[in-house]
Image: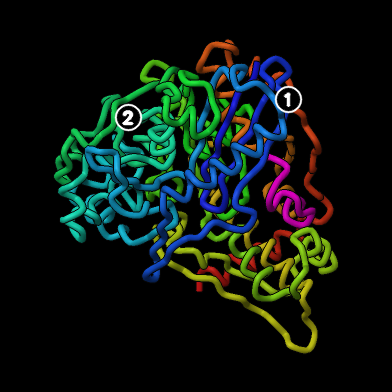
Amino acid sequence: MYLLGYDIGSSSIKACLVEAESGKIIAQDFSPKVEMQIIARKVGWAEQEPELWWANLKVAHESVLRKSGIAVEDIKAIGISWQMHGLVLVDKFKKVLRPAIIWCDSRAVSYGEKAFEALGRKRCLSHLLNSPGNFTASKLAWVKDKEPQIYKQIDKFMLPGDYIGMRLTNNVVTTIEGLSEGIFWDFKKGCLSREILDYFGFDENFVPELKPTFGIQGFISTEVAGELGLKEGTPVCYRAGDQPNNAFSLNVFNPGEIASTAGTSGVVYGVLGKIDYDPLSRVNTFAHVNHSNEQIRLGVLLCINGTGILNSWIKKNIVSAGISYNDMNDIASQSLIGSRGISIIPFGNGVERILENKGRGCSIHGINFNTHNQSDIIRAAQEGIVFSFQYGMKIMKNMGMDIQVIRAGNANMFLSPVFRQTLASISGSIIELYDTDGAAGAAKGAGIGVGIYKDSKEAFASLEKLAVIDPEVAEKPQYQEAYERWENYLGK
């Protein structure tokens, strides 16, 4: 008996097959092997073709089935995770009307800011827990204003995972978690936000049917069964945005538990058991995977757009051809704490929420051409990313979050000893690394949704802890000095 999970990222699409009884990963793969194309027709824009997600899902899916050699009849449930805050539009024939406007696209900032002021900052935050900001609702408002010919053809808007769910099942549905990340959910009233719909002039019929995060959301269609080699009628019974799902993958389910990722973007995500928000909306609060009107479970999301993408930029443009990310990590470790005086502000991937939706850009400070070398620059980039995490975690702590242990998958930036040790030491938190990823989490979510697992404790009984990183107490002053220098440059 097996569970299948898909993770729809902006860099790649992952597929993972999990044996339900043991919880072990049987096969996994991703596509493409280089970063997936992001279309940037103007500065601040970021789009992807939804058909590209589907094409790469098929490649990863076929690889997983081939590697595993299992009978598809033994796949009992499918789950989906996706890049958050995107906008996919389809007409009444379920045809995509334009490229998806994805999470790091900043064209709609002004629409969100105007809504924030018009609806009232306090009312927005107390009901929506966020400014409409640059989220899905604001992106839809941009389409309404700038592309009226497309807007009038809309039958439904979707998040990226809803689109994949539609392709799998032919059903257009969403969840509370999905609506909340789009800023369509009223937490005070526990329903779809009429105020957002009315303010932007959206037709309520654009909103997909609401389904539970864990539960039957549709069944593999006849057409897709033939296309993917799956059994017709296999249930799709879990979906969640990548950061709530990543936290779920690390068994972060209850108040006080913290998860982190550091891929293209970087995230620290903690669970709250009460309705709360940051007054400046620098960190964001959404429904966690197990949230309901009866049991409040909110995910406080600190997101840094300029994370792994900075590391990737350095790999493409600074280091020699053939140098791998592992090689870069080794090179970074040859420098010293504080990168011998270099500070890098990493915000070169659009506007940043922790900076109140301002586009600060990336900048490098303190280079001496006579003394600094490649190792100092690579380490300064990794430290700059960590320091942006620390800057945001200070906001989370002011909301009452107690960050003592950070759980993360053993992947991406967390593979760097410099990155993870700097994060542990500057935050004073223990870091626990686990053998899991978003696609595996989506598979186990499907196991809960179909009833194979009774709860998250049972689903993650086999979760393997790979390493523990403790803060370097003796070197704390050196990390603190480097952070304060970084923060001073940020403020200039």
Q: Which residue is mark 2?
A: 187
Residue at 65% x, 32% y: name it.
Answer: 65
Q: Is residue 411 magenta?
A: yes
Q: Comparing marks 2 and 1, which lies closer to the viewer?
A: 1
Q: Residue 291: where, in percent of width, then height? A: 44, 24
Q: Looking at the picture, which amino acid does disc 2 mark? A: Phe
Q: Nearest the camera: 468 or 402?
A: 468
Colouring scheme applied when the structure was drawn: rainbow
**Vertical order, 94 against 443 (above or below):** below
> Residue 382: which quarter of the image?
bottom right
**Visible residue check, residue 406:** no
Assess disc 1: are there few (<14), some (14-19) or many (≥20) residues with their C-alpha within 10 Å of its C-alpha.
some
**Vertical order, 21 against 250 (above or below):** above
- Name the secondary structure under disc 2: loop
Q: Which residues are magenta?
A: 405-421
Q: Looking at the picture, which amino acid does disc 1 mark? A: Lys
Residue at 83% x, 62% y: name it.
Answer: 330
Q: Which residue is mark 1?
A: 24
- Name the secondary structure under disc 1: loop
Residue at the limit of the structure toward the bottom, as seen here: 370
